[in-house]
Amino acid sequence: MGIAERKQLEKNARKKLIWIAHQLFFIKRLCDATIEDIAARAEISKGTIYLYFKSKADLYFSITRPALENLSKRLKRITKKESDAPEVRIRSLCMPSMLSILTTGMLTILSLGTKQTSINIYFQRNGLRFSGG
């Protein structure tokens, strides 16, 4: 097996773990889902997960990061439109597509029963902010 094939297998395994973790975090909540649960559902050993992710928080961040990045880009685009009246910019923030991004991104962080302190530590280590309750 060549390097390219191996990298593709690793990428696919990582995507599979993210998908499984996303399902379990939704069903069981982040606090109650364990690495063991994810490993069992993926039919791999617990240690194998740590080949792809440093921790459960790292795995969770891999799930939420795309939504958060998309949200950040859209918010920057909207706030930079100084030619638009403030009311127009505020309406742009409230559009259904923005609410969808918020729901899948920021509100997911708040609603999964996270242990705020561990998530805060993870976000701080990665130069991010988390102010959820």
Image (cartoon, helix red, strand yellow):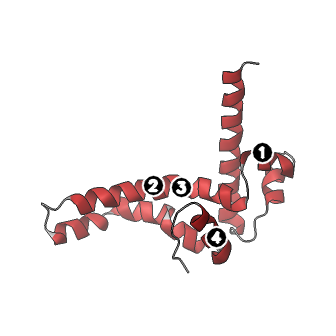
Instruction: Specify whether 105 is left or right of 93.
Output: right
Q: Which residue is mark 4?
A: 121
Label whose residue precedes the other's in the sequence (4 or 2): 2
User: Which of 75 and 38 lies nearest the eye of the viewer?
Assistant: 75
Which three-letter amino acid code belongs to the residue tagged 3? Arg
Amino acid type assigned to the residue bearing label 4 in the image: Ile
- For mark 2, what is the residue? 69
For label 2, the SS is: helix
Residue located at (14% from left, 62% from top)? 84
Earlier residue among tags 4 and 3: 3
Q: Callout 4 environment at 10 Å: few (<14), some (14 to 19), or many (20+)?
A: some
In the image, what residue occupies the spot 66% across and 57% down? 58
Measured in 3D between alpha carbons, the distance from the residue under mark 1 to the one under mark 2, in whole angstroms, is 25 Å
Marks 2 and 4: in contact by CB < 8 Å?
no
Q: How far across and down, in percent of the image, does residue 8 sit? A: 66, 29
Q: Residues within 10 Å of mark 1 (few under 14, many from 20)?
A: few
| Callout 2 amino acid | Glu
Q: Nearer the viewer, residue 103 or 4?
A: 4
Q: Secondary structure at mark 1?
A: helix
Q: Which residue is mark 1?
A: 51
For marks 3 and 1, give the one nearer the viewer. Answer: 1
Q: CA distance from mark 4 to mark 3?
A: 16 Å
User: What residue does disc 3 label?
Assistant: 65
Look at the numbered discs 2 and 3 and tell me whether their residues touch, using CB distance below 8 Å. yes
At mark 3, the secondary structure is helix
Q: Is residue 60 above or below residue 31?
A: above
C-alpha span from label 3 to label 1 = 19 Å
Residue 24 is situated, as x and y percent measured from the top left of the image, at 71, 60
Residue at the extreme top:
2
